[in-house]
Image (spheres, rainbow, N blue to C red):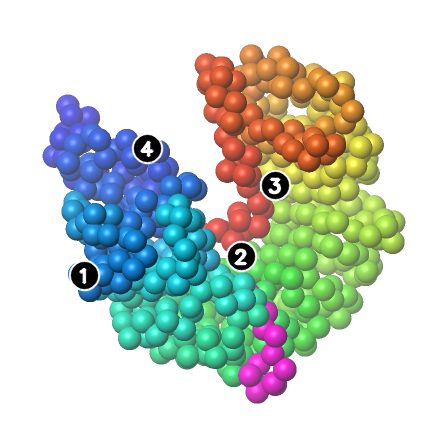
Amino acid sequence: MTCSKIFSGDLPELTNEIIQHFRKDFSTLHSCILVNRFWCRLAIPLLWESPFSIPTRNCHYIEVYLRHLNDEGKAKFNEYGINNDLLSSNTLFNYPSFIKHLNISSIYFSIKEWVGTLVIKNNEKLEKLVYRSLFEVFLENEGILNSFEIVMFMNIVNFNDTMELILQNPNFIYNIRNLKFHTYNISFQNIVPFLKFLCSNCNLITSLHFYFYFALSNINDFSLIEKYLSQIIMSQHNLKIISFGSSNAILYHPFLSLKNSNCSNTLNTIIFDNIDFKNIITILKKVFDHLNVLDSIHILYCDSLNSDFVQQIIKVIKPFKLRSLFMKEILYIESLHLLLQKCGDYLENFEFGSMREEYEESRQQFLKLIMKYCTKIRRFTSTMPDDNNIYQLIENTKQTINYLTIDNYYDELGSIVLQNLGQVLPFKLEYLRLSLSFNSNDFEIFLKNSQNTFIKRLLISNMMQNESVSILFYIKKYIMRRERVKYLAFSEFFPDIDTDEELFFLEHEVNEFKLHNIIVQKYSDLYISVYNIIYNFNK
C-alpha cells in the first residue's frame, strides 16, 4: 500500500526524499522521469542542477538552454548557420531556472565540444556568443547558484563579460554556499571587481577555496588581492571549509583573518595545498588557537615543514587534527618525527609523491615513523612501492585502510608489487588502483594471494611488457567468475605502438562481466583522486 502511494504521488514528502537520494545517480534519475509526471517533476530539477559536470560527451543540453533565448538573442546565431529549427522554443520545463552549480572551465570545454559538432567556421566567435548567451539565459530565467567554481587557466573565456553580467544581476550568486577560485595567470583586472563584489554581497559561503597564481610584478596588485580575500573571509557567518593554494605573496593576511573573523566557532576544515609555510609560520599558533571546532587539517605537498613549523604546531593548545599528509620531499626528518608524535594518531590520508633519489633514505625512515605513530590510515598512495615497509604498513592498517593506489610503471617494481601485495590486503577494500608494468605470471600470483579480498572498485592499468598474453584471461578466471569486485576498469597500454585498449569499449566482454554482477566502467570514470575526496569533505 505504501509503495503504491509513493509511486502515485500520494506521499509527496517521502517521494521527494527518495528522489533526492539519487541526486548524483544520473542513470537512476533518468529512469525516475519515466515513472509518471509527478516523479518526472521531482527528477528533472536534479538532472539540470549541474549538467556541465555530468560525464557525457553529449552536449545537447546547450541547445535546450539556447531555446530559452528571446528572438533577438536567437537571431545572432543566424550568421553561423544555426537557424530557428535548432533553437525552437518548445521545452517542457524552464530548465535554466534549475541551475545550481557552475564551473567556468566545464562550461568552456562543453561549449567547444558542442560547437565542434556543428562543423562551422569562425568557431571562436561562435564560442564566445554561446558562452555569453548561456549566462544571459541563466540570469533572465532567475537561476540561483549554490556553487560557483571559477576554474580558469589563462584567459580561456571572455571572463569580463561574465563578471559584468553577474555584477548587474547579484541575485544569481548571492546565495552561493560553495565558492572556488582556481586560476592561473588570468588578468588581474578581471578578478578584482568580482572579489570586491563578493565582500559585500555573499556572506553565506560554507566552503571557500583559494588557488591563485598570478603573473604579477606590482606589489600593490598583490596587496589588493590579499585585502579582498581577507574581507571575503571576515564577511562570512557560517564558513566551515577553507583551502589555501595561493601564491605565497597573498597568503598571510587571508590566513590571519581566520583569527579575526566570524568563523571561530564554525570552521571545521582547513586544507593547505602546495603552499610554502614560511610566510605564515609566525602566526600558525595564533590562528589555530582561535579555531574552536577545527576537526580536520590537510597538508598536501607543502614546503617548509621544518623545525620552526613543527615548534609552532607543538605549541598549539588545541588538538592539531592532521587528517592528510602528502609528501613530495623529506628535508627535515627530525621535525617530521615530532609532528607525527603530536598528531600522527589523527592521520587518515597519506601519500608519497614522486621523490628524487636523494630522499630515499629519509623516505624509508619516515615510512617507519608512519607505521609507528599512524594506526588509522584509511587512504594510502605510493609511487615508489619498492620498500617492504609499505606492505607492512598496509598489513598493520587492515582494520582501517579502504583506498589504496600504487602507481609506478618501472618494470621491476611491478613484479615486486604483485608478489607482495596480495597477501597483505584486508578482506574488503572500497578502492584499489594498480598502475604498473607487469607480466601475466606475477599478476596471477597477486590474484591467487588476494582471493579472500572483495574490492568494490578495482582499476588496473598495465603497460604491456614483451609478451602476447593479455591478462584479461586471468581477470576472468580469478575475478569475474568469483564475483570479487562490483565495479571494474581495465586498460592495457602498448608502448611499442603507442596505443591502448580498454575493456569498457569491448561490448561483448562487458556483457559477459555483467552476467556475473560486475559493472565495467571507463578507467577515467572509475578513477578516484584522494584530492577529490578531501575537497568534497563535508560538502
Q: Amino acid at mark 2?
A: Asp
In the image: residue 312, left or right of residue 535: right
Earlier sequence position, callout 2 versus callout 4: 4
Relative to 412, is 281 on the left or the right?
left
Q: Is residue 310 above or below residue 61?
A: below
| Quadrant position of the N terminus in the picture | top left
Residue 96 on image: x %, y %: 25, 55
Q: Is residue 210 magenta?
A: yes
- Residue type marked 1: Asn
Residue under numbered circle 1: 70
| Residue that badge 2 annotates | 295
Check the image and report above or below for 89 versus 166: above
Mark 3 residue element? loop
Residue displayed at 28% across by 31% down: 31
Which residue does the numbered mark 4 point to in the structure image?
28
Q: Earlier in the sequence, mark 1 or mark 2?
A: 1
Q: Distance between the Cα atoms at labels 4 and 3? A: 30 Å
Mark 4 or mark 3: name the one nearer the start of the chain.
Answer: 4
Q: Residue 434 placed where, x, y %? A: 66, 33
Distance CA(mark 1)–CA(mark 2): 50 Å
